[in-house]
Image (cartoon, rainbow, N blue to C red):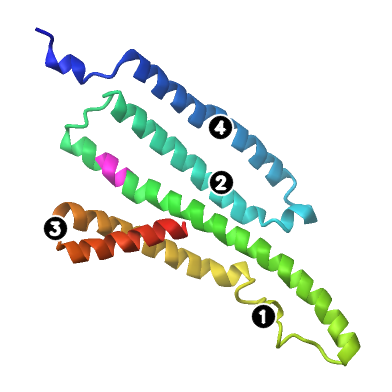
Amino acid sequence: HRDVSDDSKPSSLSLVIDICNWILSTFILLGIESYWLFRIIKSSGSMIIQKRKPGILLISIFSLLIYVVINSTIAVLTGQRIIDTKDDSVMQFIIATILCISLILWYIYIYFSCCRYWLLFYSIHWSISCAKNAWYEIINGNDNDDRDWYLKNNKTYGSWTWLRCRLMLWIVFCCIYSILFLIFLTVWNLSITITIILVSIQLLLTALS
């Protein structure tokens, strides 16, 4: 009779695939991203780079890189039984790492990237509105600041300083809700209605990201 425990051991092919994936995500992609980050930092003083919000880009990319390294390492260690996943202390450490580090890094990457794209979008339309306002002032003798949404809200929705605090509060809310969502589903015996509501909110947060 074959030993049943042998069937649960990862195959050599699985080991090779996991190690190659880990090397690809941790070293090769990390090296490529690090090179371009170095180029961005080196050229961050130029006007063309400043317009593309390099500070926000660096934060989002750094968060993504650390997230990929952590998750790919955990995937290899658990998938290949290098660490004992039956040990409660080990599993608690893995879960705590995912919830307290990986989850936060993921939301930072997603929402900082979205905020950067929004600011680039706003900057383009603000420039167009400025050009239109110059013609409007010449033709009509007064400006159009109060009527144009982009000109009127440049110091709020078009400002990284104004958006930053609100963005961080939103990320904190998403992290807290995601953690509570997992706790509610795994610990408490919730009714089907409450479960559907919680899943819908979690899917909405995922869709927004």
| Magenta portion: prevailing SS class | helix
Residue 176 seen anywhere in this rendered image of the structure: no
Q: How far apart are marks 2 and 3 (CA)?
A: 36 Å
Precedes in sequence: disc 2 or disc 1 = 2
Dot 3 or dot 4: first in sequence order is 4
Which amino acid type is shown beneath numbered disc 4?
Leu
- Residue 103: give x, y in percent of width and height: 38, 50
Q: What residue type is labelled 3?
A: Trp
Disc 2 and disc 1 in contact, CB within 8 angstroms: no
Q: Name the residue under label 1.
A: 149
Q: Where is residue 27 in the image (x, y as percent from the top left)?
A: 53, 28
* Total number of numbered discs in the rendering: 4
Which residue range is magenta in the image? 93-97
Q: Which of marks 1 and 4 is in front?
A: 1
Nearer the N terminus, badge 2 or badge 3? 2
Q: Mark 3 points at which residue?
A: 188
